[in-house]
């Protein structure tokens, strides 16, 4: 069968499939909520032609309704998809729940206080002052930088160690050479340094604070209220769930998490997370570079499209995997891929977002 005809049939069936297997999503025709069905169809066809390499799913919600859903591999709706570091944003939501449920006193709680009987290398009083907020914003003083292969805290070094928490808290305090900007001179008073190890350590904090496994905590306080029934956590050699990456969820469930953020912590009229936590999470806390800021494990930037300028909140991971939340437009988009070894994978999915999906927005 001709690929274009097959794509049209699949696009037409997307809404039927959604209606039949919508979980607790309400579905709608794109045009009824201010999005162009024709332009979404064009996006679908472009993906099928291979313009964006190995995209595996595209889902779009507008005004809280599922308006487009399509899969481009053999897995379909039921497969748990590994979106790599998009997991970090889920960890941020779990920390918010732990605070809301009074397992953790607040973002100013000191990380070392959750491991009082452990001895760590490179003792320094400044390490004792590292807070949960420091790890949430990738701005602790630990010498940890995934973008620097020479960094002692580079995540590739962590994977060689059994205990990820100990690996993190053993790290020395980072130095700031004369040519680098010190935290006090940086925007928001923080120096950003992408550190997966710090987020992995937040999983240890959750387990110590709540006295239950991360997976059980997530099921009780986040996934359960959202109707997320299946989750595949990567387990570290010490038995701790890897909160820094690798979580497998269905694409629809990632869409639920994005909609939860767009709804400021509400899902189907029920409060799941405090509005104040969502607001703090998606407010800039550290400057990454000229185009990106960072909240509590969420990326913040503006995406420019033919449809306008869209301030975005992003959960994202290797391969260009993205949950893109546009609070002002109440649009949530999930793009999953297996483009892990392709250079410029994020730029590729950014182009899909800007040139196709956001261009379908008719509300601007």
Image (cartoon, helix red, strand yellow):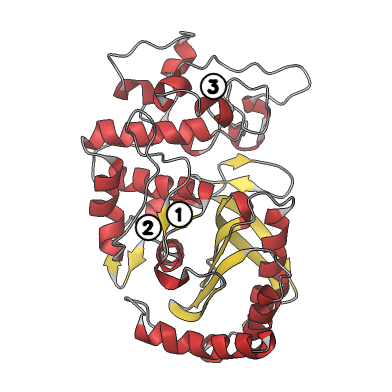
Q: Is residue 364 visible?
A: no
Spot occupied by residue 359 in the image (x, y as percentages of width and height): 69, 77
Q: Of label 1 and label 3, which has the lower sequence position?
A: 3
Q: Secondary structure at mark 2?
A: helix
Q: Position of residue 339 (x, y in %)?
A: 64, 56
Q: Is residue 31 above or below residue 296?
A: below
Quarter of the image containing the C terminus?
Answer: bottom right
Residue at 68% in and 68% down: 352
Q: Which residue is mark 3?
A: 142
Instruction: Give me the residue at 67% from left, 73% from top.
Output: 47
Place residue 105 in its image quadrant.
Answer: top left
Mark 2 nearby-residue class (10 Å; few <14, some 14–19, many ≥20): some
The residue where tag 2 is placed is 275
Q: Are marks 2 and 1 in contact (CB under 8 Å)?
A: yes
Secondary structure beneath label 1: helix
As measured in the structure, the alpha-carbon distance from the residue carrying label 1 to the one carrying label 3 is 27 Å
Q: Quadrant of the N terminus?
A: bottom right
Q: Tag 3 or tag 2, which sits nearer the N-term?
A: 3
């Amino acid at each position: 069968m001709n690929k274009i005809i097959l794509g049209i049939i699949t696009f037409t069936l997307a809404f039927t499939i959604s209606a039949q297997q919508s979980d607790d999503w309400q579905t709608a025709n794109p045009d009824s909520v201010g999005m162009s069905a024709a332009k979404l169809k064009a996006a679908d066809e472009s993906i099928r032609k291979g313009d964006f390499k190995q995209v595996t799913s595209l889902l779009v919600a507008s005004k809280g309704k599922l308006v487009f859903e399509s899969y481009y591999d053999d897995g379909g709706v039921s497969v748990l998809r590994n979106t790599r570091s998009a997991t970090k944003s889920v960890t941020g939501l779990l920390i918010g729940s732990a605070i809301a449920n009074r397992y953790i006193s607040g973002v100013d709680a000191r990380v070392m206080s959750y491991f009082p009987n452990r001895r760590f290398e490179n003792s320094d009083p400044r390490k004792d002052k590292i807070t949960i907020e420091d790890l949430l914003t990738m701005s602790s003083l630990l010498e940890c930088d995934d973008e620097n292969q020479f960094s002692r805290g580079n995540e590739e070094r962590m994977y060689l160690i059994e205990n990820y928490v100990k690996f993190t808290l053993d790290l020395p305090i980072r130095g700031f050479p004369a040519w680098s900007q010190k935290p006090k001179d940086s925007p928001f008073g923080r120096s950003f340094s992408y550190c997966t190890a710090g987020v992995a350590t937040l999983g240890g904090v959750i387990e110590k604070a709540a006295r239950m496994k991360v997976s059980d905590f997530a099921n009780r306080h986040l996934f359960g209220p959202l109707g997320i029934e299946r989750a595949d956590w990567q387990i570290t050699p010490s038995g701790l769930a890897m909160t820094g990456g690798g979580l497998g969820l269905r694409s629809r469930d990632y869409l639920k998490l994005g909609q939860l953020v767009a709804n400021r912590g509400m899902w189907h009229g029920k409060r799941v997370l405090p509005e104040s936590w969502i607001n703090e999470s998606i407010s800039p806390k550290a400057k990454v570079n000229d185009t990106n800021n960072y909240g509590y494990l969420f990326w913040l930037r503006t995406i420019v499209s033919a449809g306008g300028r869209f301030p975005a909140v992003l959960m994202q991971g290797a391969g260009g995997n993205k949950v893109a939340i546009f609070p002002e437009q109440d649009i949530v988009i999930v793009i999953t891929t297996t483009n892990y070894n392709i250079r410029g994978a994020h730029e590729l999915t950014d182009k899909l977002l800007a040139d196709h999906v956001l261009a379908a927005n008719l509300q601007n």
